[in-house]
Image (tube, helix red, strand yellow):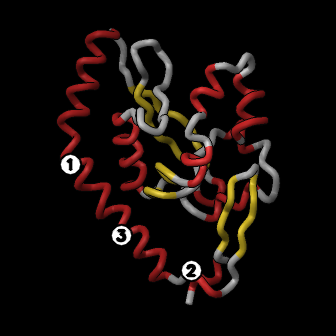
Amino acid sequence: DILTTHQAIYLVNYVPLLSLGTEDFHFSHLFLKRFLDILIAIPVVIVFLPFVGIVIFITYLKQKRWPVRRIERIGLKGKIFYMYRFISSEGEASTDELGKIHWPDVFFKLFSVIKGDMSLVGPRPEVPEIVALYSKEQKKVFSVRPGITGLATLAFRKEGEIMSSAKDLYQTYTQKVM
């Protein structure tokens, strides 16, 4: 029933967005998605908490500084939320490239899923500076929680390569990735 009414596909910067219309999402659908997010996230956090703790502690000893940074992102309904990133020994935030996923970052994102700021699957959580450049069409992504993975992850799986060859990171990101 939900897939047969008010559906549309929008192309936003060559990334397809499937719209099912918010009027079609009943409480039960939203509850089920949230329930599955929590059902998966909590056990994974419990299992990997000791390992991530050890990695953070060892990194702290090597770097002589706290290796976790709080960063601002825009989420559901355009509201600001904070997520955490693991900072590598080079002092830069680690990247999430397909096949080279930095699991401490995924672990921290799972905390955002449990907290309700993110979902397992959804659009990419963006920084406020980039969101300020969004068109009205692009702002439709704020009708759902941002996710750890989603279509943007697949569409831009070589983002690391694109960005590493960029002279101006901001310009390259806004023109080629966003």
Tell me what residue is drawn at x 41 percent, y 44 percent: 109
Query: Which quadrant: the N terminus?
Result: bottom right
Q: Where does label 1 land, which residue? A: 46
Tell me what residue is drawn at x 45 percent, y 82 percent: 28
Above or below for 106 versus 151:
above
Q: Residues within 10 Å of mark 3 (few under 14, many from 20)?
A: few
Whether residues under marks 3 and 2 lie with C-beta atoms below 8 angstroms apart, the answer is no
Which amino acid does the dot numbered 1 rest on? Answer: Ile
Q: Is residue 27 visible?
A: yes
Whether residues under marks 1 and 2 lie with C-beta atoms below 8 angstroms apart, the answer is no
Which residue, as the protein is rendered here, is positioned at the far bottom? 1
Residue 139: name its quadrant: bottom right
Q: Where does label 3 land, which residue? A: 35
Residue 138 point in image, percent of width and height: 75, 55
Residue 175: name its quadrant: top right
Q: CA distance from mark 3 to mark 2?
A: 15 Å
Q: CA distance from mark 3 to mark 1?
A: 17 Å
Find numbered disc 2 in the image and state the secondary structure of the residue it sits on: loop
Above or below for 142 versus 83:
below
Q: Looking at the image, is mark 3 or mark 1 earlier in the sequence?
A: 3
Q: Which mark is residue 25?
A: 2
Residue 129 point in image, percent of width and height: 71, 36
Residue 74 point in image, percent of width and height: 61, 47
